[in-house]
Amino acid sequence: MGRARSAVAARTSLGALREALNQAFSVEQAHEESHNDFFDAVQYCRSHSGEFSGTEGSEGWYFWQVGDWALAGDVSLGLCKNQEALRTASETLGEMVICGIDTMFEYAHFAVYDEGKDRRLLILEDDEIVDEGFPLQAERGQHVDDFQEEDAERLWTSYGLPTFEYDPDTGPFTCVHVKAIE
């Protein structure tokens, strides 16, 4: 979990996930590249993220498929933090699982949205924990009072999604530069 990143997953196609996220986040695609190496995908995203070296209002997202899950990720944590956009996307896509981790700042985010509604939301930020919705089966026997990055990752992987512990090695990664629609 060396670098900050977030990911959104839905049981759908990559195209459907991209379209739903573009509409929900009110962005349009400016550029696209494909990379087989995750490090290259991360570099692409960093160079297009307004938080790093990209222009303000722009972001870099990477997309890839893991089994029947379509995933979108970023390195600025913007995908996981816009809860309203995620609710909107889930109206189209159904169940969506979201995770964000930044070990440098002790930030952890885990959420499940379904048909525009919050099912579960756990956030650790600035030593404060947000705990909303009903606990999931994977939370049995766990104490939310101690929610940490490892807990967010454990809940994420309970859905059969790839660990954040190491970088994904199964490309290709479709990288897109998106900009806010003016």
Image (cartoon, grey):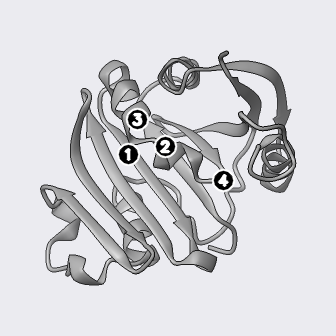
Residues at marks 3 and 2, CA–CA distance in whole angstroms: 9 Å
Observer-nearest residue: 65 or 39? 39
> In the image, which disc is placed on residue 86?
3
Left/right of residue 20 with respect to residue 72 in the rendered view: left
Identify the residue position indicated by label 2 in the image. 8
Q: Is disc 1 placed on a helix, strand or loop?
A: strand
Image quadrant where residue 166 sits: bottom right
Identify the residue position indicated by label 4 in the image. 76
Is the residue under label 2 in contact with that under label 3 (CB below 8 Å)?
Answer: yes
Quick one: label 1 or label 2, which is nearer the N terminus? Answer: 2
Identify the residue position indicated by label 1 in the image. 97
Left/right of residue 75 with respect to residue 129 in the rendered view: right
* Numbered disc total: 4
Residues at marks 1 and 2, CA–CA distance in whole angstroms: 6 Å
Look at label 3 and name its amino acid: Leu
Look at label 2 and name its amino acid: Val
Quick one: label 3 or label 1, which is nearer the N terminus? Answer: 3
